[in-house]
Image: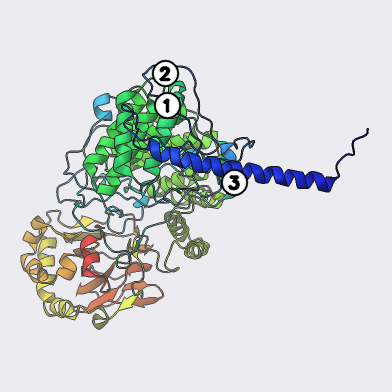
Amino acid sequence: MKVKEPSKAELKKEKEKLVSRKESKNEERKKGKKEKETDRKDKKTADSGISRKESPRGLKERAASEPNFPPPEAEPHTEPEDQVPLGTEPQNIEDEVKEQIQSILHEMVHTEHGEDLQQEEEGPAGELQLEEDDFLTTSDVDDRYEILEPETLHEDTEDTYHVEETVSQDHHQDMEEIMYDQENSDSSEPLIDEERLHQEADDVTYHDYDEQDNAIEDSNLISEEVNATPVEEHQEIPPETNRKTDDPGQKEKAKKKKPKLLNKFDKTIKAELDAAERLRKRGKIEESVNAFEELVRKYPQSPRARYGKAQCEDDLAEKRRSNEVLRKAIETYQEVASLPDVPSDLLRLTLKRRSERQQFLGHMRGSLLTLQRLVQLFPSDTSLKNDLGVGYLLIGDNDHAKKVYEEVLNVTPNDGFAKVHYGFILKAQNKIAESIPYLKEGIESGDPGTDDGRFYFHLGDAMQRVGNKEAYKWYELGYKRGHFASVWQRSLYNVNGLKAQPWWTPRETGYTELVKSLERNWKLIRDEGLAVMDKANGLFLPEDENLREKGDWSQFTLWQQGRKNENACKGAPKTCTLLEKFPETTGCRRGQIKYSIMHPGTHVWPHTGPTNCRLRMHLGLVIPKNGCKIRCANETKTWEEGKVLIFDDSFEHEVWQDASSFRLIFIVDVWHPELTPQQRRSLPAI
């Protein structure tokens, strides 16, 4: 008897019934598992030290061979609640990357220069030896933690700036984080987005590479007890570095490069590692620290367990804002790198993170040693050489940095990151015309780390100095890309929302009493300045910030960054006594109080100050009748003896001295009047 074949409709109907029955069975199975899981919660393995979590979705348990260390007592395997349907093959974890890596928060080194602080002398940076004692050196500073602010900057120095990221070529993403985002995704209990408040990148400082006195490694740090400033009250906008994390091409690279962080042994304890890591991902930092410490105790030769411990200490340092804990993390990262059989990807991540955290603490030379070791281990990785170049720049060693970038450009001539930094070094060496193509091509490359306001700033400035009219085109582009407040106002370290105008009246500032006092006592101030000039004891120092096209311009500083120069004030005691009544200027840690003398034939290039947080007062003391003028934005003015001019030096300004005799003025910086008392206390010095 011939059996009638079922129709397609009948097959489809039958299939639906089977699927329905399977789903029903799955629901019953899940319900049973939940009940079993509840019964098991109080039955932790005695020697595991951590609670067993569900297996990551889509990943198989690996029985593997017996480990070298005693494994935890086995417990029945259970599938997670959100396990994929039966019969579905595990997905390739590379295909599970669906969300962008979160934006990197800025971590900036914060230092305040003391009167007599100097950069430690350790000999030429290029001769640093990889000695273990140096490699593990930590600072003796008190247990305090930097706020996420820019470091102190030298006054008006165009060749001084901060860089948000020193490790830029791999688009600033911790590939290990990507792997865990893929492997440990769990829709039933999503991981918090803010699992790492201080990912991969730190903001670090490029010192003026020709001025070593500003490169202070162990900074004055903000105390742990200082309360964080409310976001709505203190919104300083640091220079931006575009890491291109939105670029599909960059994300594709991240998908392709799947890091291998587990050695053969670590694969056998992967479930325990995953459980501890999930605690860290969910922000349960103290619990994750305990979990990884227990794993390190049980498996002392496990690189991944020790790396997890270092990451937890790193997280805990951020949470507690503790340098002591961060130094502990730095040591643990070093312990990871010292273990045998460390996978190369893990070794690279470990040393990179160690270098970054050293930079965060201001340990620039220690960071350089770490970077040197990285380059030795991975000599073909040009991104690490770029990082090494930044490491040299951080200690003011232009020569070695220049050699590193030349080496990178010889191998990869179109490396945009190397180009902008090489162009910057050339400009700092006053090779203005030479610097332009490197800065221009580097920005145009669009490579990570190149779309940064500082490079637009320096490119435009270089073009202005050679008479290239395209300068303002680049300023305009920098403004459109959000790096500058306007084409005229190009300061890089700003508080958002402050009133911005080139010229101010005393009434607008609210500092009328200070202005009246300066104008009422201008002859006293003048006479003390002239007396210092006559002593020929070197108190007036030449302007050394490469701001002059030509001429002779010197300054005698009484206060800098809110700190009184006691020795200088001995030369102008009455002036200093007068000023101490006005904390809006003596306490202005983003400004100076100084005499400024300019001789005939001097021209100061168009330039901008570093921040919009201050206003600048000029009191005329000795002013020739003709030939001296100052332009701020598109308005030009002249000084008068005994009168105060007030302008915002974050706007472009330019000075000419074409008189037949010297010009002497008194410069007094004050806090921007719209800054709150909290902001004035918490903003780091410039």
Which badge, 1 or 3, is on the more N-terminal residue? 3
The quadrant in which the N terminus is found is top right
Task: Look at discs 3 and 2 and give the one toward the viewer.
Answer: 2
Q: Residues within 10 Å of mark 3 (few under 14, many from 20)?
A: few
**As drawn, 177 above or below 334:** below
Disc marking residue 269: 1
Closer to the camera in the image, 301 or 41: 41
Estimate the x, y position of residue 364 in percent, counting from the top left. 29, 39
Could you tell me if the residues under marks 3 and 2 are in contact, i.e. CB atoms within 8 Å?
no
Contact? badges 1 and 2 (CB < 8 Å)? yes
Image vertical order of residue 562 relative to residue 517, above or below = above
* Residue 396 visible, this orientation: no
Q: Amino acid at mark 1?
A: Ile
| Amino acid tagged 2 | Pro
Q: Earlier in the sequence, mark 1 or mark 2?
A: 2
Q: Earlier in the sequence, mark 3 or mark 2?
A: 2
User: On residue 249, which mark appears?
Assistant: 3
Q: Secondary structure at mark 3?
A: helix
Q: Position of residue 538 (x, y in %)?
A: 15, 53
Dot 1, crowdedness within 10 Å: few (<14), some or many (≥20)? Answer: many
- Rendering quarter of residue 269: top left
> What residue sits 28% from the left and 54% below the top?
153
**Residue position marked by numbered label 2 in the rendering:** 67
Q: Calculate the distance from the C-alpha at mark 1 to the C-alpha at mark 3.
A: 34 Å
What's the distance in space between the residues labelled 1 and 2, CA to CA?
Answer: 8 Å
